Amino acid sequence: MANQLLAGKRGVIFGALDDQSIAWKVAEKCAEEGATIVLSNAPVAFRFGEIQKLAEKLNVEAIPADATEVADLENLFSKSMELMGGKLDFVLHSIGMSLNVRKKKEYTDLNYEWMHKTFDISAISFHKVMQTLWKMDAMNDWGSILALTYIAAQRTFPDYNEMAESKALLESFARSFGYHFGTHKHVRVNTLSQSPTMTTAGQGIKGFQEFFDYADKMSPLGNASSEACADYCVVMFSDLTRMVTMQNLFHDGGFSNMGMNPAVIGL
Amino acid sequence: MANQLLAGKRGVIFGALDDQSIAWKVAEKCAEEGATIVLSNAPVAFRFGEIQKLAEKLNVEAIPADATEVADLENLFSKSMELMGGKLDFVLHSIGMSLNVRKKKEYTDLNYEWMHKTFDISAISFHKVMQTLWKMDAMNDWGSILALTYIAAQRTFPDYNEMAESKALLESFARSFGYHFGTHKHVRVNTLSQSPTMTTAGQGIKGFQEFFDYADKMSPLGNASSEACADYCVVMFSDLTRMVTMQNLFHDGGFSNMGMNPAVIGL
Amino acid sequence: MANQLLAGKRGVIFGALDDQSIAWKVAEKCAEEGATIVLSNAPVAFRFGEIQKLAEKLNVEAIPADATEVADLENLFSKSMELMGGKLDFVLHSIGMSLNVRKKKEYTDLNYEWMHKTFDISAISFHKVMQTLWKMDAMNDWGSILALTYIAAQRTFPDYNEMAESKALLESFARSFGYHFGTHKHVRVNTLSQSPTMTTAGQGIKGFQEFFDYADKMSPLGNASSEACADYCVVMFSDLTRMVTMQNLFHDGGFSNMGMNPAVIGL
Amino acid sequence: MANQLLAGKRGVIFGALDDQSIAWKVAEKCAEEGATIVLSNAPVAFRFGEIQKLAEKLNVEAIPADATEVADLENLFSKSMELMGGKLDFVLHSIGMSLNVRKKKEYTDLNYEWMHKTFDISAISFHKVMQTLWKMDAMNDWGSILALTYIAAQRTFPDYNEMAESKALLESFARSFGYHFGTHKHVRVNTLSQSPTMTTAGQGIKGFQEFFDYADKMSPLGNASSEACADYCVVMFSDLTRMVTMQNLFHDGGFSNMGMNPAVIGL
């Protein structure tokens, strides 16, 4: 399936932790499609994850950056442009973590310091990435910026907890910054709303397996895999989708537009 | 128009600053419709606004509370229940302020400390209000919680800046907490998305007059006034809308569903 | 709960068949709230239903009209204005029927003549009602036109079959005509998207009971009853919602914004 | 930009009239990307348009079919499979025409016979195409069916008239049939909501040039061209988007998520 759709393009991919990560698959597909890439993740993920293994496999650099720290992002983008020899054509934001979920706080008993930290990591980091790219003028014309999100931004999935708000925030940043990037630099900004995925992060959520199965049954095509998600990311980075911007794109086997599936209620 | 729709009901109304405020009109209408109410606003608003005047006029109490401080909210709700002699039937959240807007920062050059503060004041305060009500078990069965919002949560109005994200966050809190309040206490939670309104807050936004006129022309019925908004709030607090929950209700003369109005392009 | 919210108003209510009908409850509530009304339904419904009983009970007229026949509508509105002594303030469209559903045709094996007839009865009739009101100048300023719809217009419920398309069509007519009525006559046009309801019509749909229970479990407040729906209709006809137009209003206990309810998957 | 994304795939493309048509560009791109195709259009379009010229240029067949006639569709698909040597992998529906628009009827004075004809041509034809494909079992597993639509299905553009309803209907058919095709044949069904485009059809709409300019100014990336639309269609037919179904995909330079663009009001 390698069509060299990204030949000559340079990108930065955030969020590969291990080979369960969507970002891991995206990195592999982008390389296959001819792109030059730089990987990044938080310093802690470098210690506990396997991003270096991926970097070696793809023969690219992995640069640690705490995406909540503007200085780290500046360093990352400046080194990336130097390493790859030019401005960026695409960026993937695949970052999310909720402290209240991790600490098993109920939605009706949230800790607000943790909530701020959750939003900072999972959503405001996206604005920081874009503002840094903007100020450094680091994106090429007709470039593509993409963040991964989830339908909890639109509808309530109680166990998703404050990540619902993180994703609502993330998607709003995409629309708002999309206007500025579109008008001034012809760069598009979108979010891709993916099926529940069996990543290390996904598995940490309460009742995830039951929910995964429910979503799979509800979706006419079943849940979308992380490999399929990587394909769709490639499409969004390619020149074939240049006029798509400020959109939230569901990649979910049809889940988002199902009201009720007879399979779910055993009819 | 007084039909005693709220006879016997008790409510807390946040956000009346002066007689331009929507919350001011809501308080007046609620009193007219037979409700018992308590007013609240931030301590600073007590100094610079005229909330005490309204309290005197309506013969009710006004209690200062910083809605970002849980202790203030606890004090407010506990005093309110004592003053009014029972649990609450309705609450209006009409609170919003952006530090980056106030300091004239561009969307591509935001200060992140201020952004956190903006979200805390304009959106997280709504979760704090609800979590405090929840923990104190301060809402009556079939009560109604409502927050004012704006369509920038769905679509981009560049000058609205980070308030777009604040409103996206606010609306997400309404949906998420609406599930919990609905399931466990039969309390509904909604947001009301109002036309641009000539309040003291609204007027602080760059290009507000031009935008107000544009929205007015785009809307088949014109912009909705704050008086009309107060009527709709009364409806949402009354027993006639008990099964409406987790909704974002546009009150905007039709703006939200117009794609293009010939009046705008001079046809 | 009678607050005389509709005192002095005149309305026409389509669709009361028997005391299970939503329109039946709406008629009763409107009368309670002080409105003068005229009932209407198709000639065949006069023979098999009990609309005359309702007319007697409320001491109003019931006038047969096939809502797909413009001449019938002209006759109905002209007689209604004569009987009630003036133009109309509100109209309820609660009409729907699918021939393919009735004849148990699968969605992948539809008869297209029947489909046209279904659309004519269930959706185009709404345009005919509005166009007739428009041409006769039969609506008072600030009047309210409302049609009942279902969330199948947005999401797929396979057993709802071609009624999904009927409702999508109906809601589009509301938006489009809402622009004209709003701009030229200050009349608002909305649709109310109701929970599955145990009407005679609802019960005809395959697997309705299972689906009713599913929706009830999915909705934090449970399914909305037809009595609650009638309350919401009253609100939409009253002067308290004058600036709400071109909207689709969910009245569904929260169903529309639930992604997944743990109650449904037995968590 | 030819990456052989559609190598080995067979498709039928409806709606190429002349080299202004989107379908014309899609046919050219699909051929470039390695697909085998058959063109189709209404018999009258064969007489007045230039589809035969395109067929010759691409060295493919053009087969007349009135898409409102099931027998014509059966003939078309059966001949297409025979000509191309197998089942279909993709189908494009780019068909639309409004009799009331053509005859300059106002939205408040529509002719209902013409309305039925409009819906039949512009929307029901899509169900007929899908039902015929379904019954003939003419789609390959993981195939892709796509129809072109316009944002008037969601928001009101008064001059678009009854085409708003046609598009609402069309999009609903995509969702409903998408469930069946997804569940039983792994085939996806989507609609692509394109910017106003300077086609022969587009130009027939009243005030089109003014509207085109307005949309262009409102959209951060400007209006999407028909060439860009063809690129996006290729993506939707390729294996890179297999899990995207029942979606309405905006391809509009950001128009759909703009609330107000300062450029439009001269700020």
Image (cartoon, coloured by chain):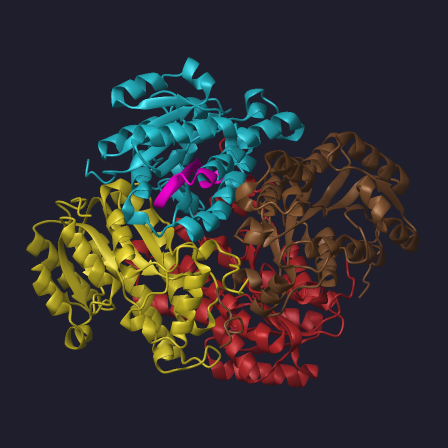
Chain colours: A brown, B cyan, C yellow, D red
Q: Which residues are magenta?
A: B134-152
Q: Is residue C253 left or right of residue B36?
A: right
Quick one: D91 or A192, which is closer to the camera?
A: A192
**Tally of numbered discs:** 0
Residue A177 lies, with reference to residue D43, above or below; the image says above
Q: Is residue D263 left or right of residue A227?
A: left
Residue D45 lies, with reference to residue D214, above or below; the image says below
Residue B137: in magenta span: yes
The x, y position of residue C205, in whole percent, is: 37, 75
| Quarter of the image where the C terminus of chain C is located | bottom right
Residue D73 lies, with reference to residue D145, above or below; the image says below
Q: Is residue B22 something that shows in the picture?
A: no
Residue C94 appears in which quarter of the rendering? bottom left
Quick one: D208 or B132, which is closer to the camera?
A: B132
Residue B220 appears in which quarter of the rendering? top left
The x, y position of residue C100, in whole percent, is: 38, 78
User: Residue at image x 71%, y 45%?
Assistant: A95
| Residue positioned most to the top | B47
Residue A78 lies, with reference to residue C223, above or below; the image says above
Residue C230: in magenta span: no
The x, y position of residue C107, in whole percent, is: 46, 77
Q: Is residue D57 something that shows in the picture?
A: yes
The x, y position of residue D73, in whole percent, is: 53, 80
User: Residue at image x 42%, y 27%?
Assistant: B76
Quick one: D205 or A192, which is closer to the camera?
A: A192
User: Residue at image x 59%, y 72%?
Assistant: D182
Quick one: C6 or A207, which is closer to the camera?
A: A207
